Image (tube, helix red, strand yellow):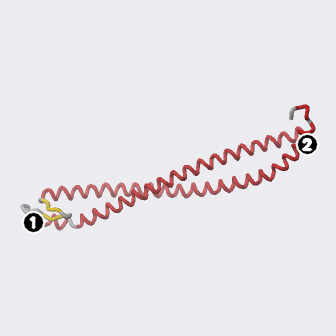
Amino acid sequence: GELETSLPDAVRDQKVQNQLEDARGELIDRRVSLSLATGQIRDLQAEVSRLQQAIERRQTILADAWPAMEAAAGDRSQPVQFAGNSWQPDELGAEVDRLLSEQDRDEVQLKVRSEALARLEHSVQESQSAVADMDTRLQQVQTDSQAAQPLLSQTAAPVSRSCPDHGL
C-alpha cells in the first residue's frame, strides 16, 4: 500500500533532480560558448576597426596619387614627390598599383569581417536571450522542486519506519 505510492514519488523526484543537473550542465555549456563568442566579437571588432583605419589612411595617400601621376606623365625624366618620397615615374605607377591592390584586398576583407561580425552579434543576442530564458525556467523548476520535496519526504518517512525488516 504505502510503499507502492511512495516509490513513484521517489523515482519522480530523482528524475527531476537528474533533469535539473542536466539543465544546469547545459546552462554552463551555453555560458562558456557565449563567453567564447564574446571574445570572438571583440577580436572581429578590432579587425574591422584596423581594416577601416588602413583603408582610410590609404585613401588619403591615393588621393595624392593622381596629381603625382599627372606630373610623372608630363615629364618622364624627373622624379615625382608622392607619399613623402621621391619616385621615378615608372616606380610611381608600380607603387600606386600596389596601393590600389592592397585597398581592394582590405575592402573585401572588411566586407567579409563586417558580415561575420553582424552574424555573430545576432547569434550572441539570441543565445543570451535563450540562456536568460533557460535560467528563469531552471530557477522556477528548482523552486517548484524544493516546494514539493518536503511533501515527498513526509509521505516517504512513515514508509521507511513501518518496514524496518525490509531494509528500506
Residue 4 in the image: above or below residue 75 = above
Q: Secondary structure at mark 2?
A: helix
Q: Residue at x 13, y 64 (%)?
A: 80
Residue 164 in the image: above or below residue 83 = above
Q: Residue at x 71, y 43 (%)?
A: 18
Q: Residue at x 8, y 64 (%)?
A: 75
Circle 1 residues within 10 Å: few <14, some 14–19, many ≥20:
few
Query: What residue is disc 2 on?
Result: 158
Where does the N terminus fall, quadrant-wise? Answer: top right
Where does the C terminus fall, quadrant-wise? Answer: top right
Give amino acid for label 2.
Pro
- C-alpha distance separating marks 1 and 2: 107 Å
Q: Which mark is residue 74?
A: 1
Residue 61 in the image: above or below residue 12 = below
Residue 116 quadrant: bottom left
Residue 85 quadrant: bottom left
Q: Where residue 138 sits in the image (x, y, percent)?
A: 69, 52
Give amino acid for label 1.
Gly
Q: Where residue 139 sits in the image (x, y, percent)?
A: 70, 55
Circle 2 residues within 10 Å: few <14, some 14–19, many ≥20:
few
Q: Secondary structure at mark 1?
A: helix
Q: Where residue 37 sits in the image (x, y, percent)?
A: 51, 52
Q: Are marks 1 and 2 in contact (CB under 8 Å)?
A: no
> Is 101 on the left or on the right of 113, as rendered?
left
Q: Residue at x 35, y 61 (%)?
A: 52
State the residue in front, 74 or 16. Answer: 16
Residue 81 in the image: above or below residue 33 = below
Q: Which marked residue is nearer to the observer: mark 1 or mark 2? A: 2
Q: Earlier in the sequence, mark 1 or mark 2?
A: 1
